[in-house]
């Protein structure tokens, strides 16, 4: 999600899309994709939601290295009616919401450098495609993403984008899910990160709390490091149901009179799965 004042780059279409131009990728860029893919694919079984693993084969295409969006979109369209379109980078909110509402997932076309293997600030093609696309092959999650786009268009008219952005952050990007009594990761920001794939499940530092829509939409989040709190859904079906059945208009009005919640806070009414030590976050403050 992005800021409204972004200016459309030269060469981008009115909807901010650009050609992926798959042929322009170098051997080194394809090799970077392969390195990242192999590392994540090897460590995710037993950690990631089964629905993600079921969709992962969507990315194993006929060409080596970075997926060709045309070929990828053919498979995705056949599965759930979604397609992947290339954009120059971050796009304005209204553009982002319109694409999601019409089952188009926007992805940056650049890939990180070897120096950025473990962290980069702006999402690259590995985050956008490896992190997000496998779950778009799941019909329920695919419906949730479209519903989010439609909801975003409404939120923009109600001045509530910030609140809705927190829902995206704590589900699509950094969500956890219960699977067979255990916790699994599914958020793209986690599954595309080697370090956070371990941290989110194993580290004693973060809070892990039961999903609560109102609470979540008041909660601040980190954009520069591992999360201090993760929210856990019971199922994708329940996530979709909650977001489809609730009238967000009155909800935004209700939340308007309430303050934000600090990232690390645990409230009396929270369903606490793990009460984190916050040791990791505090160590970063000491070292700052």
Image (cartoon, rainbow, N blue to C red):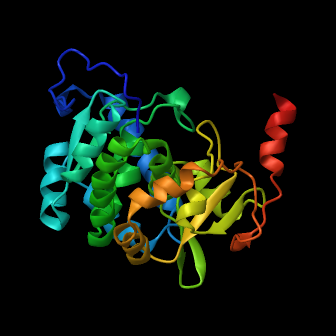
Q: Position of residue 77 (x, y in %)?
A: 14, 59
Residues 46 and 27: in front is 46
Task: Give the answer, above or below, for where 214 lies relative to 117.
Answer: below
Q: Residue at x 77, y 44 (%)?
A: 281
Is residue 7 visible in this depiction of the protein?
yes
Task: Give the answer, above or below, for where 82 lies relative to 95.
Answer: below
Q: Position of residue 62 (x, y in %)?
A: 18, 52
Q: Residue at x 14, y 26 (%)?
A: 13
Classify the position of the N terminus by image quarter.
top left
Q: Residue at x 18, y 51 (%)?
A: 102
Classify the position of the C terminus by image quarter.
top right
**Horizontal relation, residue 95 to residue 23: left or right:** right
Picture quadrant where residue 56 is located: bottom left
Task: Give the answer, above or below, for where 54 lies relative to 148.
Answer: below
Q: Residue at x 51, y 63 (%)?
A: 44
Picture quadrant where residue 199 is located: bottom right
Residues 163 and 189: in front is 163
């Amino acid at each position: 999600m992005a800021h409204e004042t972004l200016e459309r780059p030269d060469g981008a279409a009115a909807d901010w899309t650009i050609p992926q131009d798959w042929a322009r990728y170098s051997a080194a860029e394809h090799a970077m994709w392969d390195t990242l893919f192999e590392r994540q694919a090897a460590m995710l079984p037993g950690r990631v939601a089964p629905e993600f693993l079921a969709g992962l084969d969507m990315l194993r295409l006929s060409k080596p290295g970075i997926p060709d969006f045309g070929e990828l979109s053919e498979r995705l369209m056949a599965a759930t009616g979604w397609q992947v379109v290339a954009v120059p980078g971050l796009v304005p909110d209204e553009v982002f919401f319109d694409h999601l509402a019409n089952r188009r997932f926007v992805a940056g076309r650049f890939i990180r450098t070897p120096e950025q293997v473990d962290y980069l600030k702006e999402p690259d093609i590995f985050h956008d495609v490896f992190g997000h696309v496998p779950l778009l092959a799941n019909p329920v999650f695919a419906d949730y993403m479209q519903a989010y786009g439609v909801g975003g268009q409404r939120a923009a008219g109600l001045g509530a984008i910030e609140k809705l952005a927190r829902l995206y952050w704590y589900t699509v990007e950094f969500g956890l899910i219960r699977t067979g009594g255990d916790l699994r990761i599914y958020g793209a920001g986690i599954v595309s990160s080697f370090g956070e794939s371990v941290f989110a499940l194993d580290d004693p530092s973060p809070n892990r709390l039961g999903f609560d829509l109102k609470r979540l939409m008041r909660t601040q989040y980190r954009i520069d490091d591992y999360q201090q709190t993760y929210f856990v859904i019971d199922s994708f079906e329940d996530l979709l149901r909650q977001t489809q059945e609730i009238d967000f208009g009155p909800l935004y009005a209700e939340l308007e009179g309430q303050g934000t919640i600090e990232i690390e806070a645990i409230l009396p009414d929270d369903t606490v799965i793990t009460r984190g030590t916050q040791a990791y976050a505090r160590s970063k403050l000491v070292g700052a």
